[in-house]
Image (cartoon, helix red, strand yellow):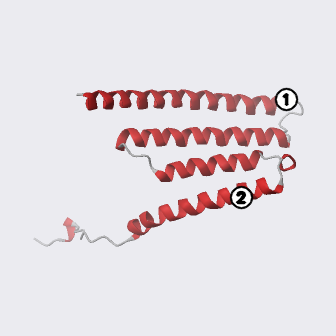
Amino acid sequence: MVTRLIQKFEHGIIVSLIFMMIVVVLISTVELAYLIVADILSPPLFWLEIDDLLDIFGFFLLILIGVELLETIKAYLAQKVVHSEIVLEVALIAITRKVIILDVKEYEGLSIIGIAALIVSIAVAYHFLRQPRKRRDDAPSDNIKIDPAEVGD
């Protein structure tokens, strides 16, 4: 009985998180659209400064992070499992966003090397995590498929 109650509670929390994430991603997307239109229509018309572009790209990647987090929560709701691939994708998008909006003058060389090492580590982990699945998907199937039209009467 207690286990069932806990499961219902967890399910309610997950559904609430999905709903809130949908609202946040939707509002963020509308805000990004407004930001783009406002930047394009401000003088000089149809001209975006580098800082504006970096803000837009950073915001865009932030929305992608939200979408990937939504995917993670959705996968957990459906399968009760957190998919490592999705978590690594979110981490890779987040660190990519950081690199895009990074002001190199504000950081020491060692910090930038640390960020680079983090990117390589996440990419290698993602590669090795995907490797077994890729081999399994590419392997020939043991199932024999028969086309009914080719079978004689």
The residue that appears at 89% across and 30% down in the rendered structure is 43
Image location of residue 56, percent across then percent down: 74, 39
Residue at far left of view: 153
Quick check: 151 above or below 89? below
Numbered disc total: 2
The residue shown at (78%, 42%) is 54
Viewer-side residue, 80 vs 49: 80
Q: Which mark is residue 93?
A: none
Q: CA distance from mark 2 to mark 1?
A: 36 Å
Q: Secondary structure at mark 1?
A: loop
Q: Disc 2 or 1, which lies upstream in sequence?
A: 1
Q: Nearer the viewer, residue 116 or 139?
A: 116
Residue type at mark 1 is Ser
From the top left corner, tell me how far across and down residue 64 is, in percent.
Answer: 60, 42
In the image, residue 83 lies at what x, y percent? 45, 49
- Identify the residue position indicated by label 1 in the image: 42
Badge 2 marks a residue whose secondary structure is helix
Q: Residue furthest front?
A: 2
**Of the two numbered discs 2 and 1 in the rendering, the one whose residue sits closer to the viewer:** 2
- Toward which corner of the image does residue 30 lie, by quadrant? top right
Give the left or right position of residue 81, taking residue 69 as reference.
left
Q: Nearer the viewer, residue 123 or 64?
A: 123
Check disc 2 and report the residue beneath it.
116
Q: Where 141 falls versus 91 (above or below)?
A: below
- Give the answer, above or below, for where 24 lies relative to 82: above
Residue type at mark 2: give it.
Ala
Which residue lies at the image location 68% right of the left edge and 31% below the top edge?
33
